[in-house]
Image: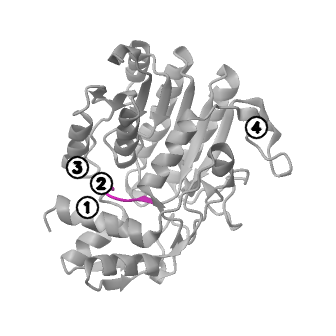
């Protein structure tokens, strides 16, 4: 099959952690992938460049270095490439960083998503998958988090911008009949992960004999989701027929009737098993063979103490349930880290 005959996927944030894995999987499955990434300096660009270099080994990959929030950039790319599906992963990430640089979140997350929706309106793909976050559940105390819960009280500006993109996407799905799946990710980790995330920071510090900051005095719980499980879920949703009329559980009285007016759905992707932060650290210590020096600290502004995904909708739509256990996932990351940084 020639490149022109292949189905085309457009992936924003393609040199990022999740974008790299999604792009690679699609290439392996025979897709042509258009990867867009501005290669921002939020964390070491060399890591993004290395991921991108792996993708570029495949002739079916096209790399574009542009800021998606710049006016008409995505409109031009959509017009040129006419993608069959779009996986929108580009975003300014990080809860704590949003306290320091909120404008970056406004521009990348909200304006960038607006530009993508406008481009899709003019050149409709068959399916748009838009990344969101478990942080959208905010102050909810009911566990596990279910997609039909009200999500009106975000705890950080990062979460507020991501929830705003969900609302924007729903309006475009309703007004212009654009099939959109919003993906709420739960604490994704694994090899090639982001240096600003706990697993990367803890591993680096422990190997260097430096203390680690343990927030909420270790009394946090997270639904840790291994990267391979996440990508499996995304790719199954890409290939699933987007029959949005069958998404909602009609026996659930918490469903909002408004959601039934658009080809729109929200899907959690998590391990559906909250783990203690202390157990997470213990897994890292065992994988490295060194005990951490712990600096116990109070919970940080914008953080929540527990996340827990209800993944019954994902299973109903795809038959898939993420299952990688924490010890195996952490061990895989530590092996990658030692190899990548020659430790």
Does residue 335 belong to the magenta stretch? no
Relative horizontal placement of residue 321, taking residue 191 as reference (left or right):
right
Front label number (1 vs 3): 1
Q: Residue at label 4?
A: 246
Q: Residue at label 3?
A: 47
Q: Residue visible at 26% across and 66% down?
A: 335
If you read the primary sequence from the N terminus, does the residue marked by circle 4 or circle 1 appear first? 4
Q: Residue visible at 49% across and 47% down?
A: 232
Residue 200 in sight from this viewpoint: no
Q: Secondary structure at mark 3?
A: helix
**In 3D space, how far apart are the residues under numbered discs 4 and 3 (Cα atoms)?**
41 Å
**In 3D space, how far apart are the residues under numbered discs 2 and 4 (Cα atoms)?**
36 Å
**In 3D space, how far apart are the residues under numbered discs 1 and 3 (Cα atoms)?**
13 Å
Q: Residue at label 2?
A: 192
Front label number (2 vs 1): 1
Asked whether disc 2 touches disc 1, contact meaning CB atoms under 8 Å apart, the reply is yes
The quadrant of the rendering that contains the C terminus is bottom left
The structure's colour scheme is one colour
* Magenta segment boundaries in residue numbering: 188-193
């Amino acid at each position: 099959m020639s490149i022109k005959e292949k189905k085309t996927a457009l992936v924003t944030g393609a040199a990022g952690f999740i974008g790299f894995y999604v792009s690679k999987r699609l290439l392996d499955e025979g897709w042509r992938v258009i990867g867009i990434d501005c290669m921002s300096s939020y964390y070491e660009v060399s890591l993004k460049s290395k991921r991108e270099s792996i993708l570029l080994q495949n002739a079916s990959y096209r790399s574009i270095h542009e800021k998606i929030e710049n006016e008409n950039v995505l409109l031009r790319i959509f017009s040129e490439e006419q993608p069959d599906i779009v996986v929108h992963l580009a975003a300014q990430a990080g809860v704590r960083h949003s306290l320091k640089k909120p404008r970056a979140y406004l521009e990348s997350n909200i304006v960038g998503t607006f530009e993508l929706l406008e481009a899709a309106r003019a050149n409709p793909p068959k399916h748009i998958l838009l990344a969101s976050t478990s942080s959208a559940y905010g102050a909810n105390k009911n566990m596990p988090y279910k997609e039909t819960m009200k999500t009106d009280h975000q705890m950080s500006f990062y979460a507020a911008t991501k929830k705003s993109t969900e609302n924007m996407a729903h309006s475009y799905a309703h007004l212009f009949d654009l099939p959109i799946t919003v993906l709420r990710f739960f604490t994704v980790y694994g090899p090639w992960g982001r240096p600003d995330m706990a697993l990367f920071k803890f591993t680096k510090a422990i190997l260097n004999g430096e203390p680690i900051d343990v927030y909420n005095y270790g009394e946090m719980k997270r639904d840790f989701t291994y990267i391979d499980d996440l990508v499996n879920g995304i790719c199954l949703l890409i290939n699933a027929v987007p029959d949005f009329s069958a998404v909602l559980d009609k026996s659930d009285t918490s469903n909002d009737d408004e959601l039934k007016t658009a080809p729109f759905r929200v899907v959690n992707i998590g391990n559906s098993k909250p783990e203690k932060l202390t157990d997470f650290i213990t897994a890292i210590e065992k994988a490295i063979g060194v005990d951490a020096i712990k600096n116990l600290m109070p919970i940080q502004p914008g953080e929540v103490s527990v996340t827990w995904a209800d993944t019954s909708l994902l299973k109903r739509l795809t038959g898939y349930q993420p299952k990688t256990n924490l010890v195996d996932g952490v061990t895989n990351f530590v092996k990658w880290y030692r190899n990548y940084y020659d430790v």
